[in-house]
Amino acid sequence: MQTPNATVYISNLSYNRDRNGLKSMFSPFGKIKNIKIIVEPTTNQSRGMAFVEMTSAADAKKAIEGLNETIVDGRTVKAKYATPLKSAPIKNIMMKASKPQKDLDFKEIQLKKKARNEAKRNSNPLKFKVANKKTT
């Protein structure tokens, strides 16, 4: 069994169910801290699932027991504890970011830098002439 937390994952919701509808569903079970409805990025339409964060794990348990396998808007909704995302350790992320690309060797990297700097100089030659001029 999952460890109880205060966030409830609810699925098989009606696509028309909005934040106020979720608030009215969950408010009898306790105070609501946050509501996150999952939407399709391109159309901004609901995917029929949401995360509802309650103020306590006891309230979340009551909401799961009260809403799981019930019919809401003609659909049988499923409610359970939300599982946290498993992320990679920070150490591994930092090590990957600091490693240079293996397919580029040192000479290729230096040539790319040189070409980039030359392009900057050519884009505004007056700026670099004044900066490179020696004072006698």
Image (tube, helix red, strand yellow):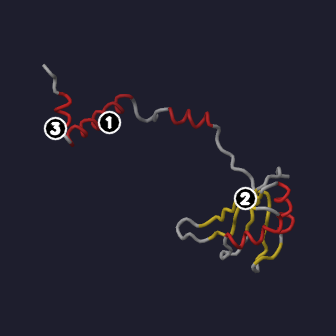
Mark 3 touches mark 1? (CB < 8 Å): no
Which amino acid type corresponds to the residue marked 3 in the rendered image?
Answer: Leu
> Residue, x 64% and y 64% (percent of image)?
38
Label 3 vs 2, first from the N-terminus: 2
Q: Earlier in the sequence, mark 1 or mark 2?
A: 2
- Which quarter of the figure has residue 41? bottom right
Quadrant hosting residue 16: bottom right
Give the residue drawn at x 79%, y 74%. 76
Callout 2 secondary element: strand
The quarter of the displayed image where residue 34 is located: bottom right
Q: In the shown orientation, is residue 68 left or right of residue 136?
A: right
Closest to the camera, between mark 3 and mark 1, is: 3
The residue at which mark 3 appears reads as 126
- Could you tell me which secondary element the residue under label 3 belongs to? helix
Q: Percent x, y for residue 86? A: 69, 46
**C-alpha distance separating marks 3 and 2:** 59 Å
Which quarter of the figure is the C terminus placed in?
top left
Q: Nearer the viewer, residue 92 or 39?
A: 39
Up the image or down, 60 lies above or below 116; here it is below
Which residue type carries mark 2?
Lys
Q: Which mark is residue 112?
A: 1
The first of marks 3 and 1 along the sequence is 1
Residue, far top: 136
**What is the distance, in whole Å, between disc 1 and disc 2 at their CAs?**
51 Å
Work out whether residue 109 or residue 49 is closer to the camera in this orientation and state it.
49
Residue at 38% over, 28% down: 106
**Type of amino acid under label 1:** Lys
- Circle 2 crowding by C-alpha within 10 Å: few under 14, some 14–19, many from 20: few
Please give left or right for residue 82 compared with residue 90 in the image.
right
Q: Is residue 57 above or below residue 20?
A: above
Mark drawn on residue 33:
2
Nearer the viewer's eye, disc 1 or disc 2? 2
